[in-house]
Amino acid sequence: MSGAQGDAACGDALPFAARGGPVSHALSRVARLHRIAAGKLLRRLDLYPGQEFVMMRLWGAGPVRQSELIRGVGLDPSTVTKMLQRLEQTGHVRRGPDPSDRRAVLVEATERSCSLLAEVTAAWTELEEWSLAGLEPGERQELARLLGKVEANLCVESADCLLDREAAAPGHPAAPECAAEPGPVPG
Amino acid sequence: MSGAQGDAACGDALPFAARGGPVSHALSRVARLHRIAAGKLLRRLDLYPGQEFVMMRLWGAGPVRQSELIRGVGLDPSTVTKMLQRLEQTGHVRRGPDPSDRRAVLVEATERSCSLLAEVTAAWTELEEWSLAGLEPGERQELARLLGKVEANLCVESADCLLDREAAAPGHPAAPECAAEPGPVPG
DNA sequence: CATTTTATCTTGGCTGGCCAACTAATGCGC
DNA sequence: GCGCATTAGTTGGCCAGCCAAGATAAAATG
């Protein structure tokens, strides 16, 4: 500090929301709050925010190539690698080599993790309902639609985005619980 | 892996978008893409995504108490501390003790950083326009409104959110460039 | 005045997430 | 067969961001 340089109030206090763009700014804040809320819900499930997306991809699918998983969640490969290392360490995930391609890695959810499926789904539902409280069905749909357009816009440049991966695939009833064949778990 | 344990496909492949909630999921993806896009724009300005918000608070204000800054951006104090340490190291920010309260720290933008104001503002505008391409004015407004509602919803529980901090503060014309009076710096 | 409470940072530790650079295995072309 | 590009994953480095715990200084309280 030491005063010798004079302060640097460049221009004075704009309303803040008026510079740049209200939507971008609101988006950042909402996303942060949303993530924090998700974190609180996931905490008791021994999951960190972000891991849910990976697990959701694994539940409901058998062993999956890591590359496919990466494409699915749309994150950086290194991010997924580290996340999987942690998920493996916490026992939510099992990894192994792919016999048909020795550089690939197969990933699958552990049986233990299956017990979380329902809870994570519930948490998501709760969070969704929470976030959208007071919004009418039409508004929710509109919000989803607008977010979709924004995502499409941002996608064009970002290069690595999913977009239209499961847009099709209509209503599976699908048991929310771990309904799959339990498969013999050797003692 | 080794197949001996039986796979753990809990339930089968839901449409994914159908579980939890489409908005929450879309929100996460959009936020991520948005942040990446912001990062690309900020990169050349020697800023990392997130720092913009802090700098925006500093530009347009003289020396600010760190605690006030923290309240303003709504982040964790430790986050802001570290961010400021880096911003100080990169010369964007200057910090010094508050003579009137020796545990407080005063923060201000450096003159050097002032040259970024316009560029950051431009980047935000560009990003905003980019994200919202193809959306009509009505849609943009609607999106902002809906995001606002969601933020309000998430705010109630999050405890540390801003919301209505500068809702007041009417139109400062305010030069977008470093216009401020050089003013005496304490110390 | 002494004690306790509160406010203001700071540090350490951990995750998510990115990029850049690297290894290893597969494929393709010659 | 040999060599080169592509693909798959990993590692290291860095930053944002959180929480929990600690150090100081100010304020409240006895």
Image (spheres, coloured by chain):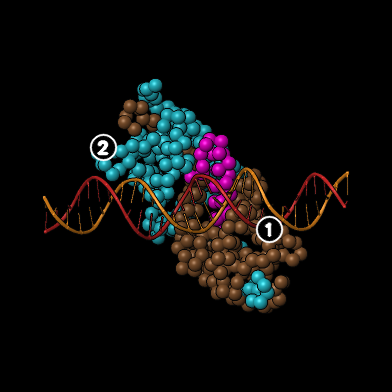
Chain colours: A cyan, B brown, C red, D orange
Left or right for B47, reference A5: left
Which residue carries the number 1 mark?
A: B67
Q: Is residue B184 above or below residue B37?
A: below
- Return the x and y of residue A109 as percentages of the image width and height: 41, 34
Crowding around mark 1 (Cα neighbors within 10 Å: few <14, some 14 to 19, many 20+) is some
Q: Secondary structure at mark 1?
A: helix
Provide the chain ID for the residue under circle 1.
B
Which residue carries the number 2 mark?
A: A99
Q: Is residue A28 at least partly visible in the picture?
A: yes
Q: Is residue B175 at least partly visible in the picture?
A: no
Left or right for B164, reference A152: right
Q: Is residue A125 above or below residue A14?
A: above
Three-letter residue code for mark 2: Pro
The front one of B159 and B22 is: B159
Crowding around mark 2 (Cα neighbors within 10 Å: few <14, some 14 to 19, many 20+) is few
- Return the x and y of residue B125 as percentages of the image width and height: 52, 67
Residue span colored magenta? A25-50
Q: Is residue B144 above or below residue B177?
A: above
Q: Secondary structure at mark 2?
A: loop
- Return the x and y of residue C1 as percentages of the image width and height: 87, 52
